[in-house]
Image (spheres, rainbow, N blue to C red):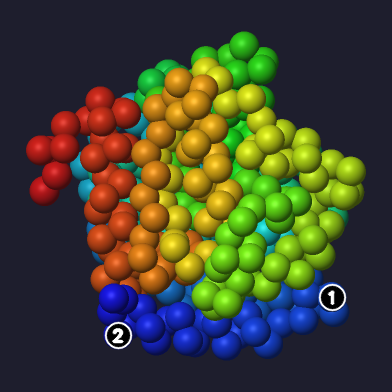
């Protein structure tokens, strides 16, 4: 059973999402509202926020006290490829960075519909390569992302593999959006339980990012990709999401390909519930659970936590 705070956040956020008409939504207005609301969220105490330009993009380095030397997390924010920036994800990423004891870089990749597929992937590749140019070895970098950012993480891994480039140490996916065709069974089985998303709206949202004939492109919908040769991947997803099947299918595909994947399905939880880390105990618990994975992939002792 979920906490009272989780029930409250579910009700409040669900009411807002139900008020949005996907067919008539004004992207610019929604960006303004969402980005303004994000300014009310708390940044984790003890985390230094440094705005910068990285690989030609507005970015932020979030640095906890006494971070692991020479290690970094590249975080790709969610927002359906249409919304999001450093501000919207500062609270979540600051808590992840502090819990893991590692510096985290958040980039503002180009957004659709002004910059459709593959602009966001190109920017993510540029950021990873810039980290390498700055002296971070592949084993010193962990990728992480939520929702569409989780899809970008998978697209980045696939692009690096296909280009013959060295892979990062691992990747964390939070409620990843991995199937723009909306063909997973949870589109039906979770339709009445998901407080945020309605299955008929998903093709409308996807159309902002790319043309319909691209929906099955493995870099757009990684559930259709060959997932051989990827680094270890850790996935958290809510059991009440219509996107649940995106996570269960990619995990099954990775296992079938002989890869290393950990999948956690959180009962009663909704899309990217981790973002409410300052508001919900379940969010804090989820972040705590991903810490050992990140530290082990980066070769940082878990016992070094304060």
Q: Callout 2: few (<14), some (14-19), or many (20+) C-alpha neighbours within 10 Å?
A: few
Which quadrant does the N terminus fall into?
A: bottom left
Q: Position of residue 85 (x, y in %)?
A: 60, 59
Which mark identifies residue 251?
none
How many numbered discs?
2
Task: Confirm whether residue 238 shows in the render.
Answer: yes
* Residue at 67 percent of width and 15 percent of height: 163
Camera-nearest residue between 97 and 214? 214
Q: Callout 1: few (<14), some (14-19), or many (20+) C-alpha neighbours within 10 Å?
A: few
Q: Position of residue 35 (x, y in %)?
A: 60, 71
Quick check: 185 above or below 222?
Answer: below
Asked where in the image residue 45 lies, by quadrant, the reply is bottom left
Q: Position of residue 273 (x, y in %)?
A: 43, 66
* Residue at 75 percent of width and 69 percent of height: 201
Q: Position of residue 126 (x, y in %)?
A: 65, 31
Q: Quick one: SS at disc 1?
A: loop
Quick check: 157 above or below 121?
Answer: above
* Residue at 31 percent of width and 76 percent of height: 2
Q: Quick one: SS at disc 2?
A: helix
Task: Confirm whether residue 136 shows in the render.
Answer: no
First in sequence: mark 2 or mark 1?
A: 2
Quick check: 26 above or below 274?
Answer: below
Quick check: 50 above or below 37?
Answer: above
Q: Is residue 4 left or right of residue 178?
A: left
CA gap between label 2 and label 1 equals 33 Å
Q: Are marks 2 and 1 in contact (CB under 8 Å)?
A: no
The residue to which callout 1 is attached is 23
Camera-nearest residue between 93 and 19? 19
The residue to which callout 2 is attached is 4
* Residue at 57 percent of width and 66 percent of height: 189
């Amino acid at each position: 059973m979920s906490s009272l705070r989780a029930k409250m956040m579910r009700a409040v956020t669900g009411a807002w999402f139900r008020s949005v008409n996907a067919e008539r939504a004004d992207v610019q207005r929604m960006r303004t509202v969402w980005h303004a609301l994000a300014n009310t969220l708390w940044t984790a105490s003890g985390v230094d926020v440094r705005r910068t330009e990285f690989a030609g993009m507005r970015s932020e380095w979030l640095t906890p006290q006494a971070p692991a030397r020479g290690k970094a997390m590249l975080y790709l924010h969610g927002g359906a490829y249409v919304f999001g920036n450093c501000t919207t994800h500062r609270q979540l990423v600051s808590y992840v960075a502090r819990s893991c004891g590692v510096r985290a870089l958040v980039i503002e990749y180009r957004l659709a519909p002004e910059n459709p597929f593959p602009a966001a992937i190109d920017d993510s590749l540029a950021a990873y390569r810039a980290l390498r140019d700055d002296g971070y070895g592949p084993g010193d970098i962990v990728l992480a992302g939520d929702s569409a950012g989780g899809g970008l993480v998978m697209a980045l891994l696939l692009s690096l593999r296909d280009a013959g480039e060295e892979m990062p140490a691992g990747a964390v996916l939070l409620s990843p959006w991995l199937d723009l065709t909306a063909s997973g069974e949870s589109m039906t089985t979770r339709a009445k339980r998901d407080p945020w998303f309605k299955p008929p709206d998903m093709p409308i949202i996807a159309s902002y990012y790319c043309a319909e004939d691209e929906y099955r492109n493995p870099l757009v919908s990684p559930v259709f990709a060959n997932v051989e040769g990827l680094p270890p991947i850790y996935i958290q997803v809510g059991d009440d999401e219509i996107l649940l099947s995106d996570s269960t299918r990619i995990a099954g595909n990775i296992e079938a390909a002989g890869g290393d994947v950990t999948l956690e399905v959180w009962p009663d939880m909704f899309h990217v519930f981790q973002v409410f880390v300052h508001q919900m105990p379940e969010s804090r618990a989820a972040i705590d659970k991903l810490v050992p994975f990140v530290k082990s992939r980066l070769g940082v002792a878990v016992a070094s936590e304060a």
